[in-house]
Image: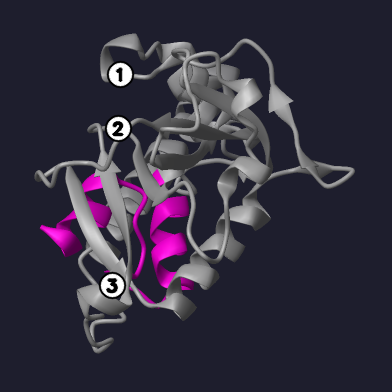
Amino acid sequence: MPAKPTITQLLRRILRATGIAMLLTIVTAFILSFVPVNTAVPPVPAQDSVQIYLTSNGIHTDLVLPVKTPYIDWRGKIPLEHFAGADSSFTHIGFGWGDRAFYMQTPEWSDLTIEVALDAVFWPSPSAMHVEYIRRPLRPTKHQRPINLSQKQYQQLVTYIYSSFQSQNGHFMLIPGKGYSATDNFYEANEKFYFPKTCNYWVNNGLKAADLKAAFFAPFPYAVMRHYR
């Protein structure tokens, strides 16, 4: 009769199985990120479009929209009163979704800690919407890519962004005192964060919801940005 495995042996087996599962997930995500969707959608003429931006800081990707269009004035849902450094002259507003703790504690890779990383990867956790008012239109760079949307595509994207916020009595729910600066804030969001359902996954799904070019699956920032570079 074979000997029963010790506690140490069981832990090693669990860690080995977890490592293999994570490796397979990462490899699968990497492969699927190169599979494009909506490639046959024709480009929208500039004169008939609403221009947005797709941005990346190397860890988070965001969607940047005009503050006001004929279809929506975001100041009605994201009041300027929540932002000490923003006013009515600001032309654009950025949106991102992600792990609440990870988002607030790691604006840059240098801020990342092992504890926050492991919690975000292995445990479904509360999410948050990051919102930033931007003073003027962005300048196109490899990290800030303009995209022209039709009226229908823009309305689909707005609906997608709306659905990501938690609401109370018709108002988005501010998380006080957690912004990086006087022009950004965090709001309570719907759904749980876990790998591979990341901030980049959220942006990529927004592009797909608006019938725009996107990756089939995109947990990493390069997988989102590569379709617009």
**For the stretch drawn in magenta, what is the main secondary structure?**
helix
- Write the start and end of the magenta stretch as one range: 200-229
How far apart, in angstroms, are the residues tagged by discs 3 and 1?
Answer: 27 Å
Which residue position is annotated with label 3?
213
Q: Position of residue 4 (x, y in %)?
A: 61, 30
Q: Do callouts 2 and 3 mark residues in contact (Cβ within 8 Å)?
A: no
Q: Are marks 2 and 1 in contact (CB under 8 Å)?
A: yes
Q: Earlier in the sequence, mark 3 or mark 1?
A: 1
Q: Where, by quadrant of the figure, is residue 82 drawn?
A: top right
The residue that disc 1 covers is 108
Q: Amino acid at mark 1?
A: Glu
- Answer with mark 2 or mark 3, whichever residue precedes in sequence: 2
> Mark number for residue 143?
none
Give the farthest residue toward the front. 89
Along the line of sight, the residue nearer the viewer: 97 or 72: 72
Q: Is residue 84 left or right of residue 221?
A: right
Relative height, residue 140 to residue 116 (above, below): below
Instruction: Judge whether residue 217 is colored magenta.
Output: yes
Q: Identify the residue at horizontal 18%, vertical 64% (top origin).
A: 227
- Measured Cα–Cα span from mark 2 to mark 1: 7 Å
- Residue closest to the far right: 169
Tell me the amino acid under the disc marked 2: Ile
SS class of the residue under badge 2?
loop
Q: Residues within 10 Å of mark 3 (few under 14, many from 20)?
A: many
* The C terminus sits in image quarter: bottom left
Q: Return the x and y of residue 1 as percentages of the image width and height.
A: 61, 40
Q: Which residue is mark 2?
A: 59
Q: Which residue is found at the position 28% from the left and 72% from the top?
A: 213
Tell me if 166 is positioned left or right of 226 in this view.
Answer: right
Asked if the stretch drawn in magenta spans residue 145, the answer is: no
Give the number of marks: 3
Q: Nearer the viewer, mark 2 or mark 3?
A: 3
